[in-house]
Amino acid sequence: MSSPSTSPTAMPVVFISHGAPLVAIEQGPYQTALRGFAQGLHPKAIVVISAHWEAELPIQITARPVHSVIYDFGGFPNELYHLRYDAPGSPETVDLVEDLLGREGWKTKRNTQRGLDHGAWVPLRLMYPAADVPVVEISLPSQLAPAKLYSLGQALTALAAHQILFLGSGGVVHNLGRVDFAHRHRVPDAWATEFDQWVWQRLQAREDEKIIAYASEAPHASLAVPPHGTEHFAPLWVVLGAAGQRKGVENIFDGFDFANLSLRCFACVV
């Protein structure tokens, strides 16, 4: 499952566990880590795929001159619903994404109406608060098998050589039925940490095939990635496909909120 290697100056490929929307209005180690990582990166544009834009095929691509944000959550402080992220779009990047996907047989459709969901704008607002880097979001066909989503990422490997940052936003462990919203800083559940560590070890070894087969390979897989609830894990497969032959994996942040909501973020680097 390899892709052509990229040039030494190519952008990394990044996975962000975006956590709860609250992270957008807080300050702490997670926010500091994302901001610090982004300070060293100056992409021409960002292409993001998020757990919060699931859609059937064809792959949709945002094509707006300026983005608005979608407040696709409820029950949080009023301050969250006044945040903005007016990042510009990028017609050139839309063209490139269409071309790369089309070469590999993926059908695409431009979406001129949709704004950025919170899986996209929350981490981007932390990483690039000036909203001065063009953004293009693509939809997530999470109904596809893991190997097929991996191949979707492979089709986008060349973005990095164009100095475009590819970012997947989801969560390594995300089971809302088990989240303890009353105790944010509780000691993490053992099952969650064991699954998170298993993923991290496989990532460091770039054992992509095992992560694709996580359901039968990983401990506590059905708890960490509930059946019929893979949308937060699915961007990880796309990211690994897009990472191509990169062997280096850099930890950006790791930890948990609410007992088992993983905040693990990492970059695949040359």
Image (cartoon, rainbow, N blue to C red):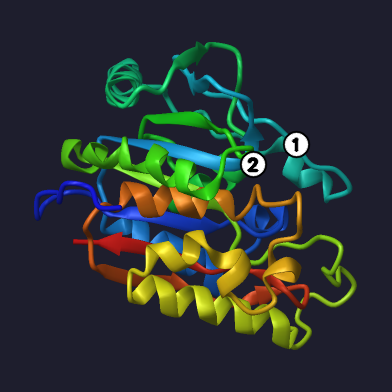
**Cα–Cα gap, marks 2 and 1:** 7 Å
Residue at 70 percent across and 62 percent down: it is 174
Residue 169 in percent (x, y) is at 53, 49
- Badge 2 amino acid: His
Q: Which residue is mark 2?
A: 118
Residue 89 in percent (x, y) is at 41, 22
What's the mark number on residue 23? Answer: none
Task: Tell how many labels.
Answer: 2
- Badge 1 amino acid: Asp
Categorize mark 2 by other alpha carbons within 10 Å: few (<14), some (14-19), many (20+).
Answer: many
Q: Which residue is mark 1?
A: 72
Q: Is residue 184 left or right of residue 215?
A: right
In which quadrant will I find the C terminus?
bottom left
Q: Is residue 200 left or right of residue 204?
A: right
Image quadrant in which you'd find residue 182? bottom right
**Disc 2 and disc 1 in contact, CB within 8 angstroms:** yes
Q: Is residue 117 left or right of residue 5?
A: right
Query: Can residue 126 be seen in this snapshot?
Result: no
Categorize mark 1 by other alpha carbons within 10 Å: few (<14), some (14-19), many (20+).
Answer: few
Residue at 56 percent across and 50 percent down: it is 234
Question: Vertically, is 149 above or below 106?
Answer: below
- For label 2, the SS is helix
Q: Give the mark nearest the N terminus, 2 or 1.
A: 1
Residue at 35 percent across and 56 percent down: it is 38
Q: Residue furthest front?
A: 216
